[in-house]
Amino acid sequence: MAVKDRDRFSTATRLRVLGEQTAARVYRSQTRRQARRSRLTGRAALLALVLCSLIVALAYPMRQYVSQRAEIADLERERQAAEDRVERLRDLKARWQDDAYAEQQIRLRLHYVLPGETGFVMTDPDAARRARADQGAADRPWYSNVWDGVDKADASNR
């Protein structure tokens, strides 16, 4: 037994036993890591599945929300434009309530003059020539004028 005891306490034996223990610990550690990795992978897959389901479930409502927000913004712009137009029309109505503005517009648009004033109307000399040319069209039947208009439109497209 003395030889066995000496073998048991020899450095080589202790190193060999230590190496086996270390190898066993490393092996156990690797198997635990692999087991943990496989559980983690399953958990990650489940988490990914849940996230994808949430994204798919929320995609349509989010799209509806965004489109409705855009529609609300468009309606707000239209409302603001309508309010601006109403304000301009109120201003115009208030201006027409003023007698001086109404008189100015009547004189400008309808060429009215006050008693004692002399009114002048300037005409375009080319307008008189064009009026004489169109006067000949009044003497012809209406369908001739229509066909002349069609021919002119066709000539302008070429």
Image (cartoon, rainbow, N blue to C red):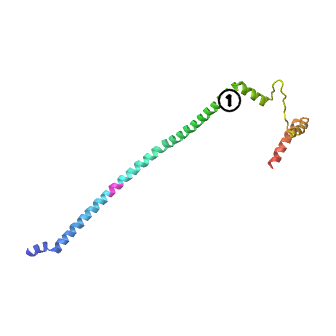
* Along the line of sight, the residue nearer the viewer: 3 or 19: 19
**Where residue 69 sits: x, y (%)?**
52, 39
Along the viewing direction, whichever of 28 and 137 lies nearer the viewer: 137
* Figure quadrant of residue 87: top right
Looking at the image, residue 28 lies above or below residue 89: below
> Measuring 22% from the left and 69% from the top, which residue is drawn there?
19
19 left or right of 35?
left
Q: Quadrant of residue 140?
A: top right
Query: Residue 17 vs residue 93: left or right?
Result: left
Is residue 95 positioned above or below 7 on the image? Answer: above
Which quadrant: the N terminus?
Answer: bottom left
Range shown magenta: 37-41
Q: Residue at x 68, y 29 (%)?
A: 92
Tell me the residue that label 1 is attached to.
92
92, 1: nearer the viewer: 92
- In front here: 30 or 117? 117
Q: Amino acid at mark 1?
A: Leu
Mark 1 neighbour class, 10 Å CA radius: few under 14, some 14 to 19, many 20 or more: few
Q: Write the residue at 40% across / 51% down.
A: 48
Q: x, y percentage for residue 16?
A: 20, 72
- Return the residue found at the far front: 116
Which element type, helix, strand or loop, lies under badge 1?
Answer: helix
Residue 122, how many percent across, how many down?
84, 35
Q: Position of residue 154 (x, y in %)?
A: 82, 46
